[in-house]
């Protein structure tokens, strides 16, 4: 299978894709992947496709559309075929396709169609690019481009092209490439590449193995004016970060955590994969509760990787962990959605979140990280650790590509502490069941509420041309009790006109009923709202009077490895 991507039409942000092959059967099915591994929602990349044409030596072959992303060709013979189409490339994320006159960033799952019968065949990839550009892809190269052993390897290999060059660094003696696209206004921090190396080394220490990608790993970082995210691959990760985020107090550490997060995915999720993703089915949504382990465990350790790498300290770790726990506690949806459900519903909930989502769902990243912490502390208490569990699972179910299931976690936990295997079932299946405060107390730490500085009303508001509109009325809040709903326009408080969302907090007093005048579908109405004393966030701190046992467990927990 020969694939060429022509990237010379940057002015119209359109890629010309061509596939050439000799069919094995006369009934040839073509299919565009519905989703990209690592990003668990159906994105229908076929929506960006046009001018689809299939040709053989006999001329244009008719294509029958079987589904929005599937086509059938009934061929007269088995002569070689050439499929061409154009793809709009205007979506600059780590999981889509983007092209402009500066560079191209392509996730192949959003670009290349799968030809039925050729999934496990070699795919040869070439780029046609402007003269001053170079192409970058983590696949092994050949004379004309790159070679993928099968379709999976192809779509797991992000493609970048532009007038930039990669630099090299080593991790445990293995050669890696660093490709930086864009630049912060004041340049990259002087220690950046050295710190990236240290975080990657720390990840290998955590896993106690060299990088599974060996000598072929490409770390791509896009520094943009806006955007945040990452996507993991077997031999690469693509990160997006933004200038404003980097300039914030904790921004640089968060960038290093993102680097560590995606690097750790080399083990956890790419190769140590939930059983449901062996192999991937690109044609439909595949549900897996194992995503809590893939993302929760990785999110927990990514907070610690800068500490392990010597780029951060314990107080920063407690700060970051406290923020993570605080976000869980401030999400009412944890009382409605279990961790297992959150992972299984990723396709339709987490990846389709809106401003009202915290009332009905909880992130399996964040609750998963809090669960990882509880597992770690409970395992440290019996002489083991979460790192032990991860390393062991890697040896038995990861490096041999077996895939894992919940029962494999239970089987590992049972010999150490049978009760923990039972408790994990509870934490996964029962809403709001995680004993976070108890596990913090085991290491002499606690979460304290920080009171809101203004009266608590529970409304999330938007300001637009002097109109103050409700976007969310949080569950269990004064706003919910008042009957206000998203879309209501707030007009006045106790007959005083409201001009901005900030006015509301100034006009309310704790425990004093206020009359809210609002408009719903252009009709005015009134309701009572009684603001309360609310919690802004929770902070994590260490007990100064911790017992020797608590201090001992805390010291062991701080090791992480
Ligand atoms: Zn992740």
Image: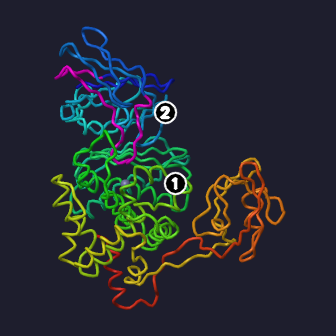
Q: Position of residue 495 (x, y in %)?
A: 84, 63
Q: Which mark is residue 90?
A: 2
Please state if 24 lies on the left or on the right of 100 as rendered: left
- Tell me which label, 1 or 2, sits earlier in the chain: 2
Q: Is residue 29 magenta?
A: yes
Instruction: Tell me the magenta residue range.
Output: 19-48
Depicted 535 relative to depicted 517: above or below: below
Gap between marks 1 and 2, in whole Å?
Answer: 25 Å
Q: Are marks 1 and 2 in contact (CB under 8 Å)?
A: no
Helix, strand or loop status at disc 2: loop
* Depth order, front residue of 328/170: 328
Residue sitting nearer the eye, 382 or 545:
382
Q: Position of 352 compared to 413: left or right?
A: right
Residue sitting at x 30%, y 70%: 425
Residue receiving disc 1: 246
Q: Is mark 1 within 8 Å of ligand 1?
A: no
Relative vertical location of residue 111 with respect to residue 433 in this rendering, above or below: above
> Which of pointers 1 and 2 indicates the residue nearer the eye?
2
Q: Quadrant of residue 284?
A: top left
Provide residue 248's location: percent of width, then percent of height.
Answer: 55, 58
């Amino acid at each position: 299978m020969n694939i060429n991507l022509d990237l010379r039409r940057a002015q119209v942000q359109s890629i010309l894709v061509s596939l050439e092959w000799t069919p094995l059967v006369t009934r040839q099915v073509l299919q565009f992947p519905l989703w990209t591994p690592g990003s668990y929602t159906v994105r229908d990349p076929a929506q960006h496709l046009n001018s689809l044409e299939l040709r053989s030596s006999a001329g244009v072959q008719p294509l029958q559309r079987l589904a929005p992303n599937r086509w059938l060709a009934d061929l007269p013979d088995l002569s070689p075929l050439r499929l061409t189409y154009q793809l709009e490339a205007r979506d600059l994320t780590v999981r889509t396709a983007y092209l402009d006159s500066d560079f191209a960033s392509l996730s192949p799952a959003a670009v290349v169609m799968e030809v039925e019968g050729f999934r496990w065949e070699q795919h040869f990839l070439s780029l046609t690019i402007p003269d001053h550009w170079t192409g970058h892809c983590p696949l092994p190269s050949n004379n004309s481009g790159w070679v993928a052993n099968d379709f999976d390897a192809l779509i797991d290999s992000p493609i970048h092209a532009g007038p930039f060059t990669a630099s090299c660094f080593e991790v445990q003696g293995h050669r890696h490439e660093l490709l930086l696209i864009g630049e912060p206004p004041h340049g990259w921090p002087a220690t950046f590449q050295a710190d990236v190396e240290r975080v990657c080394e720390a990840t290998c220490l955590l896993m106690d193995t060299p990088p599974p990608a060996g000598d072929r790993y490409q770390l791509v970082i896009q520094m943009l004016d806006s955007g945040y995210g990452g996507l993991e691959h077997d031999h690469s990760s693509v990160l997006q970060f933004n200038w404003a985020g980097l300039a914030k107090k904790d921004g640089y550490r968060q960038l290093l955590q993102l680097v560590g997060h995606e690097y750790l995915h080399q083990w956890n999720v790419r190769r140590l994969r939930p059983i449901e993703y062996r192999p991937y089915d690109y044609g439909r949504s595949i549900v897996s509760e194992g995503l809590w382990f893939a993302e929760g465990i990785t999110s927990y350790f990514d907070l610690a990787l800068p500490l392990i790498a010597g780029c951060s300290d314990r107080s920063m770790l407690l700060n970051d962990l406290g923020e993570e726990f605080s976000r869980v506690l401030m999400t009412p949806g944890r009382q409605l959605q279990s961790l297992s459900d959150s992972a299984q519903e990723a396709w339709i909930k987490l990846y389709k979140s809106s401003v009202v989502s915290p009332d009905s769902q909880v992130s399996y990243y964040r609750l998963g990280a809090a669960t990882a912490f509880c597992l770690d502390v409970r395992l440290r208490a019996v002489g083991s650790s979460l790192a032990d569990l991860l390393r062991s699972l890697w040896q038995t179910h990861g490096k041999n590509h077996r895939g894992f299931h919940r029962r494999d976690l239970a089987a590992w936990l049972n010999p150490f502490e049978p009760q923990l295997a039972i408790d994990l079932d509870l934490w996964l299946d029962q809403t709001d069941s995680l004993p976070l405060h108890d596990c913090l107390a085991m290491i002499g730490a606690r979460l304290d509420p920080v009171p809101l500085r203004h009266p608590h009303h529970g409304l999330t508001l938007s300001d637009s041309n002097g109109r103050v509109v409700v976007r969310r009325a949080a569950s269990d809040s004064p706003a919910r009790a008042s009957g206000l709903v998203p879309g209501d326009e707030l007009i006045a408080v106790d007959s005083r006109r409201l001009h901005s969302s900030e006015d509301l907090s100034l006009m309310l007093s704790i425990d004093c009923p206020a009359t809210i005048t609002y408009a719903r579908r252009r009709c005015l109405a009134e309701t009572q709202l009684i603001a309360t004393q609310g919690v802004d966030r929770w902070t994590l701190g260490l007990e100064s009077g911790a017992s020797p046992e608590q201090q001992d467990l805390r010291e062991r927990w701080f090791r992480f490895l």
